[in-house]
Amino acid sequence: MKNKFRCSLVILLLGIMFTQAGCSSNDQAALFSAEQEFLTLDEALTQAYCVAVASVDSIIEGDETRKYKFSLEESLKGEFGEEVFYVTEGYGEFYVEEMDHAYTTTESQFEKGKRYLLVLSKMSSVYFEEDKYMNVADVCIELDENNKIIQSKMYKKQLENSYRDLDGMKKRIVEINDIAEPVKAFGVPFTDSEDLTEIVPASQYIVQVSIESISIESSSNRDTYNCRVTDTLKGETAETIQAVLFKDTVEIGGDYILLLNKESDVSLLYTLSSKVSAVSLSEKDRLLSLIE
Amino acid sequence: MRILNYRGFVVFFVIFLILLNLTVVYGTTYEQLDYWYSDSNSIGKWYSTPSVGSNKLNSNSSFYFSIGNSHAKSQWNSAGISTSTTSNFSSADIQVYGGTYTELQNTGEFSSMSSTSTGICYYDSRSFKLFYEHESSVKSGYEMGACHIGIKDRGATLNEYKKTCTHEMGHSLGWFGHASGSTNIMYAYSSSYTSLTSVDKNHLSQIY
């Protein structure tokens, strides 16, 4: 009897699933639509934080982004902290200006086990578990075991005419490295330390605040709060600021001390200078002594 | 008393499913559309006036984010698609962020954005609502839900920001895909045009 009940339940669930599928659209919906600047391959190589030959170990599908785990074979530009790194891409549609070139990342761009020449940007953030690498443009250059270019998407003609193979690319990258300034990673400085004696000198701003409201509730590990500054221990800020704090580490109406940085003088978004999200007011005297 | 044995239940349920699917497939009436200018087969509609909130993440005076946003709202309003403005950003149906790549990334809302993106529109919640038909071609109609837009501070001109803001707002109002002519705001690629054309307007306003 129990088995019959379970079978009935399974049939019922399958029935609901099929019915739902029948009622919905067949479109493979992208999560976003983005317009992109067009870069020549030379510009992409110049603007990239790093260029490398690497192979895909695995592909990890997430809710909002896909991550490729790459094993580094050879770094041609920039520095990688580790031999294994992750490249992130979202599930969306991209439209490249001036080129009338469109591409989608709802399906994966790279295939497991294959070798690619990667042209990447890098972003470091206190909110990330690891540095985030992303394609600078629609660069997806697949290489065979003899370093011949098999597939190259948007830059096919340029590659065929100018670079031909990996050796040609390497020569060009050396030329670019010689004349171009090193590219900085995106991000606001922070320290990995959780020791206040090291966090204080790494913080441009140390302020006592009252948390007034959430201004940006994100789907990630952090929210942005509207904060009223009640005392300034280091640096100068406006009376109210927007600070990005880890989720569930503060309460609305609560008073805290925040140790912060921001990207530039004109930025209105303050970010944490370490993974220590908010400090209790009981630490104020200690912080003041460390500032002095 | 057992009214239905197990086998009877399964047969009854299978017949029920077949009838339900036949109703969905053959019982659906399609709303007719006069225009279709998109390369997508989908279109969206807000069933109540969406509120728009904007959040400029820096004070760079040559980043014409606010002007671009106001322009976008008035352009779509002229097409008969109205939006309201809210100062409560976190509760806005359409949240428009303006900032550098790093600032946008730090909010946690633009994890998929690449460094060369100039504008991006995320469809946070849209749901299938009905089918439309245009010249014997069936189109999917969605009910729009929350969206968020990112406009990158990239040292562009005032007109380029106006175009980017109006274009992204078009997506958030339900204009999925892109138009083919380069004078249209919903053309996918760069241009210096800042005003909606009849193509931009008619495609979307016909379902509002």
Image: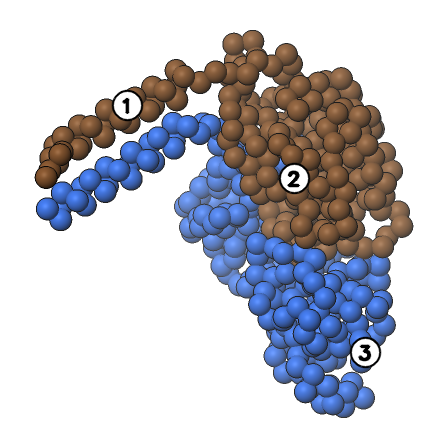
Chain colours: A blue, B brown
Q: Residue at x 80, y 40 (%)?
A: B69
- Contact flag, marks 3 and 1 (Cβ < 8 Å): no
- Residue A289: quarter of image: bottom right
Most extreme residue toward the top is: B135
Position of residue A114 measured from the top left corner of the image (x, y, whole percent): 44, 43
The residue wearing badge 3 is A231
Q: Which residue corresponds to mark 1?
A: B18
Q: Nearer the viewer, residue A6 or A163?
A: A6
- Please say if B40 is above or below A139: above
- Depth check, front residue: B109 or A216: A216
Give the alpha-carbon distance from disc 3 to disc 1, as whole Å: 69 Å
The residue lying at 47 percent from left, 49 percent from top is A62
Few, some or many residues within 10 Å of mark 3 (<14, 14–19, 20+): some
Q: Mark 2 lies on which chain?
A: B
Q: Is disc 3 in the same subunit as disc 2?
A: no
Q: Mark 1 lies on which chain?
A: B
Q: Can residue A92 be seen in this view?
A: no
Q: Label 1 amino acid?
A: Ile
In the image, which disc is placed on residue B121? 2
Q: Which residue occupies 26% across, 26% down?
A: B16
Does residue A285 appear anywhere in the picture?
A: yes
Mark 3 or mark 1, which is nearer to you? 1
Q: Mark 3 lies on which chain?
A: A
Looking at the rendered structure, the secondary structure element under dot 3 is strand
Amino acid type for the residue under numbered disc 2: Cys
Residue B176 placement: quadrant: top right
Asked if A277 appears above or below B101 in the picture, the reply is below
